[in-house]
Each structure stands twice: as structure tokens, then as C-alpha cells.
Image (tube, grey):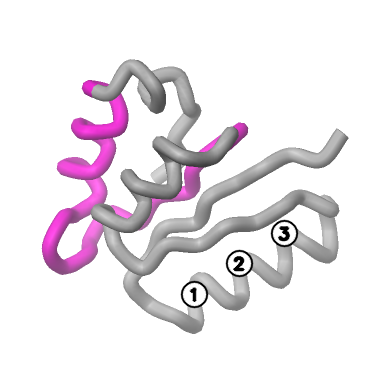
Amino acid sequence: MSRNILIVDDEEDVRTIAKLGLEMDTGWNVLTAYSGREALNIAANSKLDVILLDMMMPDLDGPATLQQLKANPTTRLIPVIY
């Protein structure tokens, strides 16, 4: 069974490298988001197994994104790794 992971980082190169590594070594389906706001939208509309979340992002940083994820009944049980 394939797992779904969301990588959230405002730096494109970090998203790209993490995505390539996870797809090659694990076979996971990797989604990416460039901002906390985009991550909230993807998380609410996708079945995710885990979220890899950057701490420092413009607009909505990691802690604020995590707070909103945990406040939403649809996304609150998704494990998040900083």
C-alpha cells in the first residue's frame, strides 16, 4: 500500500530534493506545498499519512500551520514532523 506524505517548505530546492529522495527510497506518493496556507488546503482535501513541515515560512509559519491543522477535525490526527 502506498503512503501519502505532504512536504511543506517555502524553498523549492528543499521540496524537490526531499520529494525525489522519498519517492526513490520509499515509493511513497509525495505531495508538496510552498506555504502553510497551501498545506492546509491540500491536507483538508487529501488522505495524508504524514506531513513534513518547515518551521520558518513567510505568511503562515510552521507553528501557526500546525495549530490550524490540529484545530481542524479533518486534519487533526495527521502526524506532523517539523
How crowded pointer 1 is (Cα within 10 Å; few <14, some 14-19, many 20+) is rated as few
Q: Amino acid at mark 2?
A: Ala
Labelled pair 3, 1 in contact (Cβ < 8 Å): no
Where does the image place residue 41, in percent across and percent down from the top left? Answer: 35, 47
* Residue at left offset 27%, top offset 36%: 66
* Residue at left offset 28%, top offset 23%: 72
Tell me the magenta residue range: 48-71
Residue indicated by mark 1:
14
How crowded pointer 3 is (Cα within 10 Å; few <14, some 14-19, many 20+) is rated as some
As measured in the structure, the alpha-carbon distance from the residue carrying label 3 to the one carrying label 1 is 12 Å
Q: Amino acid at mark 1?
A: Val
Where does the image place residue 42, in percent across and percent down from the top left? Answer: 43, 48
Residue closest to the far front: 45
* Residue at left offset 44%, top offset 35%: 80
Look at the picture and state if 37 lies above or below 79: below
Residue 60 sits in quarter: bottom left
Q: Does residue 56 show up magenta in the picture? A: yes
**Left or right of residue 52, residue 35 in this image:** left
Where does the image place residue 75, in percent across and percent down from the top left? Answer: 40, 27
Question: Which of 32 and 54 lies nearest the eye of the viewer?
Answer: 32
Residue indicated by mark 3:
22
Q: Amino acid at mark 3?
A: Leu
Quadrant where the C terminus sits is top left
* Residue at left offset 22%, top offset 64%: 57
Quadrant where the N terminus sits is top right
Residue indicated by mark 2:
18
Labelled pair 2, 1 in contact (Cβ < 8 Å): yes
Look at the picture and state if 11 lies above or below 79: below
Where does the image place residue 79, in percent across and percent down from the top left? Answer: 49, 28
Labelled pair 2, 3 in contact (Cβ < 8 Å): yes
Q: Secondary structure at mark 3?
A: helix
Q: Secondary structure at mark 2?
A: helix
